[in-house]
Image (tube, rainbow, N blue to C red):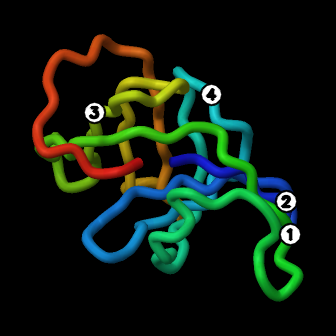
Amino acid sequence: MILEHDHPFLHWDLLLEHGPVLHAWRILQPVTCEQWLTAERLEDHRLLYLDYEGPVSNDRGHVRRLTGGWYTKGAATDEAQQWFQLFDCSLATQAVLRTDVDQHPQWYFTLADSTSRNSPESL
């Protein structure tokens, strides 16, 4: 799932369900395909954000859902990159997480063809 969040500044939260939590990244520019997007790894989020839109507690702004769906995690191409197949996501069908860059990880989204579905997790 990708949420637009307006606090402490406008950014986009990428949330991937992983067991009882959501792994979270703050993407620092509008989410688009075909370019590397700088991100910050955040603390895991509660599962309630899979279905939530609206004000965030303690005056931490508002969130608005941009897209959701499911994902499967592919084999790592090397230690620094992991790819994900996205399903029912209106934004993209594939994502790559690159962690071998300066200080922050980066995400790359594409509209590649999706062909298989293996044990999807929530996006």
Q: Which mark is residue 32?
A: 4
- State the residue position of label 2: 6
Q: Residue furthest bottom?
A: 58
Q: Which mark is residue 81?
A: none
Mark 4 or mark 1, whichever is nearer to me: 1
Contact flag, marks 3 and 4 (Cβ < 8 Å)? no
* Residue 95 position in % (x across, y down): 38, 35
Q: Amino acid at mark 1?
A: Gly
Relative to residue 87, is residue 49 drawn left or right?
Answer: right
Seen at 54% across and 35% down, the residue is 36
Contact flag, marks 3 and 1 (Cβ < 8 Å)? no
Judging from the image, what secondary structure is the residue with disc 1 in?
loop
Seen at 72% across and 38% down, the residue is 30
Contact flag, marks 1 and 2 (Cβ < 8 Å)? yes
Q: Is residue 81 above or below residue 93?
A: below
Q: Amino acid at mark 3?
A: Gln
Neighbourhood count class around disc 2 (C-alpha, 10 Å): few under 14, some 14–19, many 20 upward: some
Judging from the image, what secondary structure is the residue with disc 2 in?
loop
- State the residue position of label 1: 61
Relative to residue 28, is residue 94 drawn left or right?
Answer: left
